[in-house]
Image (cartoon, rainbow, N blue to C red):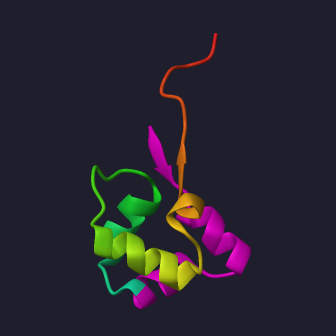
């Protein structure tokens, strides 16, 4: 499963979700869904905007995590 790490990047920068919402220009509800990994797709232009705003690369923004629980 692919997971967005924008919350962690925001914390490192000392910024809030509201700040990101204002920078990104998307609805606060949609941003919260994206940050909580509750969305099924993210447009390329939003990925690019997030990377520019957070000063990161897509590799910094996303991580792959296992879907299966460990035994």
Q: Is residue 20 above or below residue 30?
A: below
Residue 32 seen anywhere in this rendered image of the structure: yes
Q: Is residue 42 above or below residue 31?
A: above
Q: Nearer the viewer, residue 47 or 6?
A: 47
Q: Is residue 22 above or below residue 7?
A: below
Examine the structure image and report whether residue 8 is included in the region drawn in magenta: yes
The span shown in magenta is 1-23
Tell me the residue at 54%/65% (across/down). 6
Q: Position of residue 18 (x, y in %)?
A: 49, 82
Q: Is residue 59 left or right of residue 43?
A: right
Q: Position of residue 38 (x, y in %)?
A: 36, 50
Q: Quadrant of the C terminus?
A: top right
Q: Position of residue 17 (x, y in %)?
A: 51, 76
Examine the structure image and report whether residue 53 is included in the region drawn in magenta: no
Q: Is residue 28 above or below residue 61?
A: below
| Magenta span dominant secondary structure | helix
Q: Quadrant of residue 45?
A: bottom left
Residue at the top extreme? 71
Tell me the residue at 55%/37% (across/down). 65
Q: Is residue 63 left or right of residue 38?
A: right
């Amino acid at each position: 499963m692919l997971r967005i790490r924008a919350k962690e990047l925001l914390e490192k920068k000392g910024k809030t979700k509201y700040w990101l919402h204002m920078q990104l220009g998307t609805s606060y509800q949609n941003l919260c869904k994206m940050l909580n990994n509750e969305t099924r797709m993210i447009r390329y232009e939003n990925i690019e905007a997030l990377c520019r705003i957070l000063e990161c690369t897509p590799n910094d923004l996303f991580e792959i995590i296992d879907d299966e629980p460990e035994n």
